[in-house]
Amino acid sequence: MEELGVALGHRKKLLEAIAALGAQECSGMVGSTASRWEIRPAAALVKSPAERRQLTVLFCDLVGSTELSARLDPEDTGPVIHAYHRCCREVVRRWDGHVAKSMGDGVLVYFGYPRAHEGDAERAVRAGLELVEAVGRLTAYGAPLAARVGIATGLVMIGDLIGQGAAKEEAVVGETPNLAARVQTLAEPGTVVVADSTRDVLAGLF
């Protein structure tokens, strides 16, 4: 609006009107047909309804990332983290998982959403085993890297988008993601730990 030459006072009024319009729903009657029309916030038009899903959640952590960041210059740490994230994405893609979030040394992966398979728990464990091997083959300036993985399975509500831009993710309501994160802290470097909920589903496959 500034480039179009709209005065500052008018710009403020227009922005206030746009904000007010987006914050409420307006309805009215049109013509003699008494048709109803509605104006809704843009977010309401793209919001996806949450759904109940059986989900296997994998949480992968890069071991020693804090010490690595303290020892290296940020410009040197960046390529290491990028290589780690790329490695995780490639492995997860092979097992048809969904990387829900990757920030810093943590990668959160869903098996069972958005695509569900009968053997999602098995896929998650096989992906976890491949992840710790693949990350173990990476090096940071001569020193080998290591990852540890925690996996849990359970019913969740999933689907609503939260966050903005790169931080946008599917919100999951339920104990399963927290359990996966907790069992991950029990894993030794280069190993995978599964919760009882996942072990029960696997039925002796491992």
Image (spheres, rainbow, N blue to C red):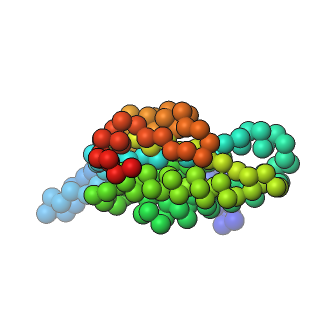
> Which one is nearer the viewer's eye here, 103 or 200?
200
Residue 26 shows in the view = no
72 left or right of 158 in image: right
Residue 76 is drawn in which quadrant? Answer: bottom right
Residue closest to the far left: 33
Q: Residue at (55%, 65%) from the top-left corner?
A: 90
112 left or right of 87 in image: left
Quadrant housing the N terminus: bottom right
Residue 50 pos. (x, y %)? 32, 47
Residue 101 shows in the view = yes
Q: How many numbered discs?
A: 0
Q: Residue at (58%, 52%) from the top-left corner?
A: 132
Q: Residue at (48%, 64%) from the top-left corner?
A: 93
User: Is 83 situated above or below 109?
Assistant: below
Residue 197 pos. (x, y %)? 33, 38
User: Is 109 situated above or below 35?
Assistant: above
> Which one is nearer the viewer's eye here, 153 or 139?
139
Residue 83 is drawn in which quadrant? Answer: bottom right
187 left or right of 66 in image: left
Residue 134 pos. (x, y %)? 61, 59
Q: Residue at (51%, 53%) from the top-left corner?
A: 129
Residue 65 pos. (x, y %)? 71, 43
144 left or right of 57 in image: right
